[in-house]
Amino acid sequence: MLDRFFDNDVSTLQQKIVLDALRPADKRDARGVEDAHPAGDGVSQAGRRPGDRPWAMGQDFSLADCGAVPFLFYGHWTHPIPEAHGRVHAYLDRLLGLASMRHVIDEARPSRSWFPLRGTPPKDALPLD
């Protein structure tokens, strides 16, 4: 169920921000983007899970964690996760600590310039082993 939260509740509004950035300046929807930004705060709901759970659904890595990665990673670009949401940052750090996730991020670097929202958040700078 948490995988659907990321797919439906977080990604839909995040994509609104990204797609708006791709539009010509005279066709942008400032109000729609403004309304979509609270979705970034919605990511903090993932941080409300009990603190003893290392992964989204409990003790085991699951599909929900796979679904969380792109939306937390790119979501941190479109709407930075507030530092006050320490559990979300710790969760994202655990996800990005997985060799498979670091590999995917590294492989995507050549395409990064196509992402319309520029900048490199600190979590993208994690070294590969």
Image (cartoon, grey):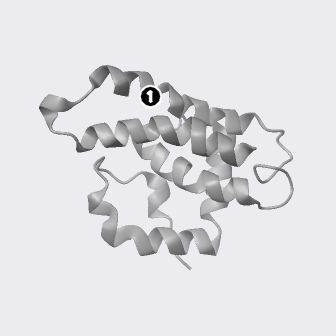
The image shows residue 51 at horizontal and vertical percentages of 82, 41
Which residue: 67% across, 49% down? 90
Residue 10 occupies quadrant:
top right
The image shows residue 119 at horizontal and vertical percentages of 31, 51
Instruction: Specify the amino acid type for callout 1.
Output: His
Indicate left or right for 61 with 129 as reference: right
Indicate left or right for 123 with 16 as reference: right
**Residue 37 at least partly seen:** yes
**Residue sitting at the far bottom:** 129
The image shows residue 17 at horizontal and vertical percentages of 37, 36
Indicate left or right for 69 with 57 as reference: left
Q: Is residue 101 above or below residue 63?
A: below
Q: Which residue is mark 1?
A: 37
Secondary structure under the numbered disc 1 in the rendered image: loop
- Quadrant where the image shows the N terminus: top right
Task: Between residue 73 and residue 121, name the one nearer to us.
Answer: 73
Which residue: 21% across, 40% down? 23
